């Protein structure tokens, strides 16, 4: 399916009240390293995983993306055994994006169309799933995912598998935290798209290579320490775990959930296999 011809059933209703992404002036300090991509450091990127974000040229947006991913890196270090070395700013036209397991990509209304070479690079990246994930975070100015024109325009002829709305039982909601939503600064969970999973019983493994939303995740990750920020960081941890482990971690989550259900019946009291993320 060509991205230009996404079916009408996936064109979602607009939502009101979305503001433009703002720079994180009070970003919480994060450990780790930040760098701009250089070819000389490509060996380091290959040896140890780094999180990456696409440079937009908008300084406020880029600063927020950097601060947000640095905060997410710190959260991953504290909660998981995944050895993320740091955060890298990449030029989507010039740099080798295949080295990065997850790419955070803020998309503005005036994003230019990628060159033919960059389109081929993005196409190859998303076809490497599992182990590669792009999070497209749209700044839709209150127009909802029904206004995906800027993203379609930017991607040009890049082809995605059929898209579907994220559901509570989707893999991304269970890779580390058992989450009911994937909120950022906003909580438009009904407006998050992922690639359709393989039909049950097909024997095929399909792990989404893209997440498309408008929750302004990086600004939430980079905000002052608060319960809301922590909830948003949990969504980010799930993104990275999906990129790094695919359905392996999901399989473990399903096993733990089934074990928990058995314990519930046996002990007649609530138990949970994974941390529960309550919807606020």
Image: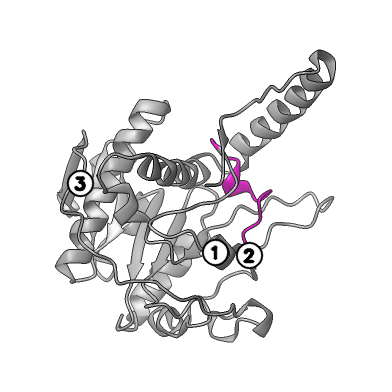
Q: Which residue is mark 3?
A: 27
Identify whether 24 is placed above or below 58.
above
Residue located at (29% from left, 84% from top): 110
Q: First in sequence: mark 3 or mark 2?
A: 3
Q: How far, Cα to Cα, is label 1 from label 2?
A: 6 Å
SS for tag 3?
loop
The segment highlighted magenta reads 165-177
Q: First in sequence: mark 1 or mark 2?
A: 2
Q: Position of residue 73 (x, y in %)?
A: 31, 39
Label annotation for residue 240: none
Q: Position of residue 112 (x, y in %)?
A: 30, 83
The answer to whether the residues at label 3 and label 1 have Cβ atoms under 8 Å apart is no
Q: Which residue is mark 1?
A: 192
Asked whether 176 falls inside the magenta stretch, the response is yes
Q: Position of residue 187 (x, y in %)?
A: 48, 58
Q: Which residue is mark 2?
A: 165
SS for tag 2?
strand
Q: Say whether residue 63 is left or right of residue 80.
A: left
* Foreground disc of the pair 3, 2: 3
Dominant secondary-structure state across the stretch colored magenta: loop
Residue located at (65% from left, 71% from top): 162
Q: First in sequence: mark 3 or mark 1?
A: 3
The answer to whether the residues at label 3 and label 2 have Cβ atoms under 8 Å apart is no
- Residue placed most toward the observer, 59 or 187: 187
Q: Position of residue 190 (x, y in %)?
A: 59, 64
């Amino acid at each position: 399916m060509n991205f230009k011809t996404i079916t009408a059933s996936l064109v979602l209703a607009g939502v009101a009240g979305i503001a433009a992404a703002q720079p994180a002036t009070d970003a919480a300090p994060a450990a780790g390293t930040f760098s701009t991509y250089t070819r000389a450091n490509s060996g380091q990127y290959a040896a140890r995983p780094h999180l990456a974000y696409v440079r937009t040229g908008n300084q406020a947006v880029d600063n927020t993306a950097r601060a947000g991913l640095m905060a997410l890196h710190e959260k991953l270090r504290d909660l998981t055994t995944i050895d993320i070395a740091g955060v890298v700013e990449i030029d989507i036209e010039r740099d080798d994006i295949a080295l990065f397991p997850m790419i955070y990509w803020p998309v503005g209304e005036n994003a230019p169309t990628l060159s033919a070479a960059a389109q081929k690079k993005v196409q190859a990246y998303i076809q490497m799933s599992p182990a590669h994930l792009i999070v497209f975070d749209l700044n839709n100015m209150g127009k909802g995912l029904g206004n995906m024109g800027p993203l379609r325009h930017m991607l040009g002829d890049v082809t995605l598998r059929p898209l579907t709305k994220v559901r509570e039982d989707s893999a991304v909601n269970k890779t580390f935290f058992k989450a009911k939503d994937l909120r950022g600064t906003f909580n438009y969970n009904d407006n998050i798209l992922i690639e359709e999973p393989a039909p049950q019983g097909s024997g095929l493994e399909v792990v989404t290579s893209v997440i498309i939303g408008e929750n302004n995740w990086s600004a939430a990750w980079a905000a002052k320490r608060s319960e809301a920020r922590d909830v948003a960081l949990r969504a980010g941890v799930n993104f990275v775990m999906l990129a790094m482990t695919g359905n392996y971690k999901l399989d473990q989550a399903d096993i733990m959930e089934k074990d928990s259900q058995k314990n519930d019946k046996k002990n007649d009291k609530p138990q949970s296999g994974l941390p529960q993320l309550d919807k606020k």
